[in-house]
Amino acid sequence: MLMKRNAIHRHLQGHQCNQAFWLPSRNVCFGGKHSRPRNVSSVLLAGGGGVAVEHVAIMRPPMGLYHEWRMSRRIKRGRKFLESGRTALDREAIFGKTIAIIGPADSVESDLAEISLDDFDLVVRMNRSLALAAGSGQRLDILVHNLVQSGSRAAGPLDTSLLRNASVKMVIFPHAEPSQISSRVLSAHQMLLRDLGMPLSLPSTDLYRDFKSDLRGKTPTAGATAIAMFLDARPKAVFIGGFTFFTTGYEPGYNDTVRTRDEAARWATATGLHDPERERLVIAQRIAKARALGTIVHLGPSVASALQVN
C-alpha cells in the first residue's frame, strides 16, 4: 500500500519521528523518537525525516522492536497495578496464626503422617493441588498459583467451581514485579473479585525484590515464594511438608511427567528461570531467621533432609 508525500510529512512533522511502523491489529504506530505508540487516524506509514519522497510503503515493525514495545506497556501497567496496594498480602491475617505449607513432592504423605492439618489455622498448597483438593476433599485454605493454565508447563485450572468446591479463602500469585503482571494476572484478579468477592493477593514488592536478590536474580518458584511469604508474616508456627526442592518427583496425579529425581531437575531448570540449589540454601536461611524471631518452624522429614537442617 502506498501513500502520498503530504500525508507522510504531516505525520512525521507532528510526531518528530524519523521512522515509524504501523500495527494493523491496533491501528497505532511507533518508532523513531516516539516514547510510546501513537494513535493514527489513518493507515500510515514509514519514511525518513524531511527527505522528500513521492511514495512510502507501509512496513510491519521488526519483531524485536514490537516485543520491546509490548514489554514496556506491560511494565507500566504492572507498576500501576502493584502500586495500587489492592493486592498486597494481608499480613494481619497471617500474624500469630498456625500455618501448614504443603508442597507436591512425592514424599508429602510421609511428611503429613506426623501431623493433623486440623490443628492448623490455615493450610497452603500450590498450583495443581487445587484440582486434587477439589476432587478428594484435601484441606486447602490458601492457593498459590502461577496462573498459567495452558501449555506444557501449565499449573492447572483456576476456575470458580474448583475454588468453591475446595473452600479456598485466598489465591496468591507468587510474583510481584511489574514485568510479571500480564493480562492473565489482571483477568484472574477481576474473575476472583467478580465471582468470589476476593482479590488476587501477591507478596509485597519489597519482600519479592529482596528474595529475588538473594536468589541472585533467578525467579523463585511458587513453593519457595510461599514459604518466604508466610515466614515473613510472623506466624505463631509453621509446618512445611512436601518440598524436596526438585530432588524427587511429584506426588501421583500432580504432574505425571515428573516422577524421578532426574525428571524433576530437568523440569526445574528447563526454562533457565529457576535455581533449585540456590533456593534450598536461601530457604534454609529464611527458616533460621524466622526461628530467631520466635516463630516455631516444624519441618517434615523429607524437607529437613533436603534442606539439611532439623
Image: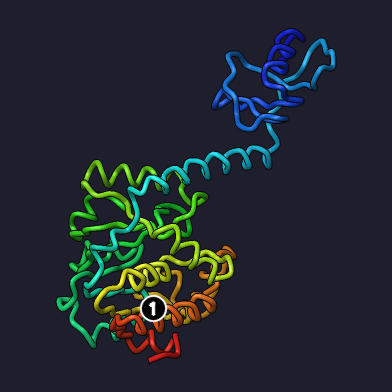
Quarter-of-image position of residue 38: top right
Q: Quadrant of the C terminus?
A: bottom left
Relative to 11, 90 lies left or right: left
Name the residue: 54% across, 71% down: 215
Q: Residue at x 57, y 63 (%)?
A: 271
Three-letter residue code for mark 1: Phe
Corner quadrant of residue 176? bottom left
Q: Out of 181 and 129, give the one closest to the viewer.
A: 181
- Residue 56, placed above or below residue 31: above
**Horizontal and vertical percent position of residue 139:** 20, 69
On the image, the x and y values in percent for residue 86 come to: 33, 48
Could you tell me which secondary element the residue under label 1 belongs to? loop
Q: Is residue 34 above or below residue 199?
A: above
**Looking at the image, is 65 positioned above or below residue 223?**
above
- Which residue matches tag 1? 243
Left or right of 117 on screen, residue 243: right
Q: Residue at x 20, y 67 (%)?
A: 136
**Coloring basis for residues:** rainbow
Residue sitting at the far left: 118
Give how far across and how far down residue 17 sits, in percent.
72, 24
Total marks shown come to 1
Q: Position of residue 105 (x, y in %)?
A: 38, 77
For label 1, the crowd category at 10 Å Cα-Cα, with few meaning under 14, some 14 to 19 and many 20 or more, is many
State the residue at coordinates (46%, 48%).
181
Image quarter hosting the N terminus: top right
Camera-side residue: 60 or 190? 190
Is the residue 154 above or below the residue 282 in the image?
above
